[in-house]
Amino acid sequence: MKPAAQARRTERIVACPTCRGPSRYAQDNPFRPFCSERCRAIDLGAWADERYRVETPPGDERDDDSPNALPTAH
């Protein structure tokens, strides 16, 4: 099978996580799974603004004595 034919076989159209428009999910799409650089930047900004969060199990909070604890302002 030729490389171009192989690429077409593995290419899919998915919904962009940001705008819900069509997005090519293929290795040559540098923004995948997003449809564009703009949608990718919007998503990154949402993470930076803490609109998305990754939940941790109860009791998994690190205490201030942890070597990985963030410094606090005094």
Image (spheres, grey):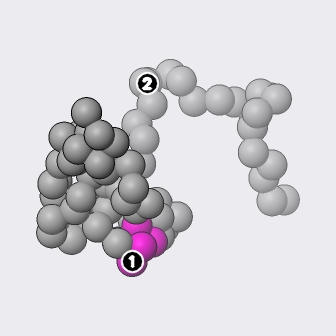
Indicate the amino acid at tag 2: Pro
Indicate the amino acid at tag 1: Arg
SS state under label 1:
helix
Residue placed under numbered mark 1 in the picture: 38
Asked where in the image residue 37 lies, by quadrant, the reply is bottom left
Relative to the observer, which residue lies in front, 22 or 43? 22
Crowdedness near tag 2: few (<14), some (14–19) or many (≥20) residues, C-alpha within 10 Å = few
Asked if residue 22 is positioned above or below residue 32 in the image, the reply reads below
Q: Is residue 72 left or right of residue 25?
A: right
Quick one: quadrant of the N terminus?
top left
SS state under label 2:
loop
Q: In terms of sequence position, does the residue under pointer 1 or pointer 2 come before the other?
A: 1
Instruction: Residue at the far bottom: name it.
Output: 38
At which x and y percent is residue 53?
A: 41, 48
At which x and y percent is residue 71?
A: 80, 49
Quick one: quadrant of the C terminus?
bottom right
Q: Is residue 35 visible?
A: yes
Relative to the observer, which residue lies in front, 5 or 10? 5
Residue placed under numbered mark 2 in the picture: 58
At which x and y percent is residue 42?
A: 40, 73
Residue under the point 65% across and 29% down = 62
State how far apart marks 1 and 2 are (Cα). 36 Å
Magenta-span inclusion, residue 72? no
Relative to the observer, which residue lies in front, 19 or 29? 29
Q: Is residue 53 left or right of residue 18?
A: right
Magenta residues, as a range? Answer: 37-42
